[in-house]
Amino acid sequence: LLLLHRNKAPNAGQYSPIGGKLEAAIGESPHACAVREIEEESGVSLDQREVRLSGMLAETAYEGDTHWLIFLYEVTRPIDPNEIPTMTIDEGTLEWIPVDDVPGLDIPATDRDVIWPLVRQHRNGFFAVHIDCRTQPFTWSIQEEWTAP
């Protein structure tokens, strides 16, 4: 997996997937946002047909007061490392991480305990999950899921 070792908030010092905010004011679709953010942060140019929605996450009160709606996409074609012009960007450092090593990385608790296990379980499938961070420990529930046959 290509992950970002972040040097900015949120989650400074931790690993996370490439991502960013949807530009709702211009009517940007989640697919277009995924393609744009991948290109902005990695330099990899993709067609919207080369990404697939694999998860949808709602996080209530992340870090106490932020609510997130996250669309999780996976790239459907292999990425040649030479497509990435630089591994150091303003947001942090991009790193190729073996899938099995992700749980041992410094990642947010919601990623470690909920999101990454669901990503692995639903490869080529889909899940929708709600994570409620208003209480500690946080609670979560799967609202929809399917796995590939």
Image: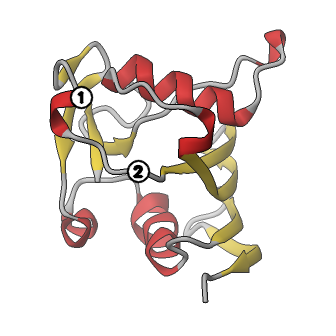
Q: Residue lying furthest bottom in this view? A: 149
Query: 85 or 6, which is in the foreground?
Result: 85
> In this picture, is 19 found above or below 24?
below
Percent across and percent down for residue 76 are 47, 53
**Residue drawn 45% across and 75% down?**
117
Residue at which label 1 appears: 83
Q: Tell me the quadrant of the picture where the N terminus can be found.
A: bottom left
**Cα distance, mark 2 to mark 1?**
12 Å
Percent across and percent down for residue 87 are 16, 26
Query: 141 or 43, which is in the foreground?
Result: 43
Q: In this view, does 1 lie to the left or right of 66?
A: left
| Image quarter of residue 128 | bottom right
Q: Which is nearer the N-term, disc 2 or disc 1?
A: 2
> In this picture, is 32 found above or below 66?
above
**Residue drawn 22% across and 33% down?**
94
| Residue 77's disc number | 2
The count of marks equals 2
Percent across and percent down for residue 25 are 82, 11
Query: 1 or 44, which is in the foreground?
Result: 44
**Residue drawn 50% across and 73% down?**
123
Query: 109 or 83, which is in the foreground?
Result: 83
Question: Can residue 29 be seen in the rendering of this structure?
Answer: yes
**Residue drawn 56% across and 45% down?**
51
Q: In the rendered structure, which amino acid carries the disc numbered 2? A: Arg
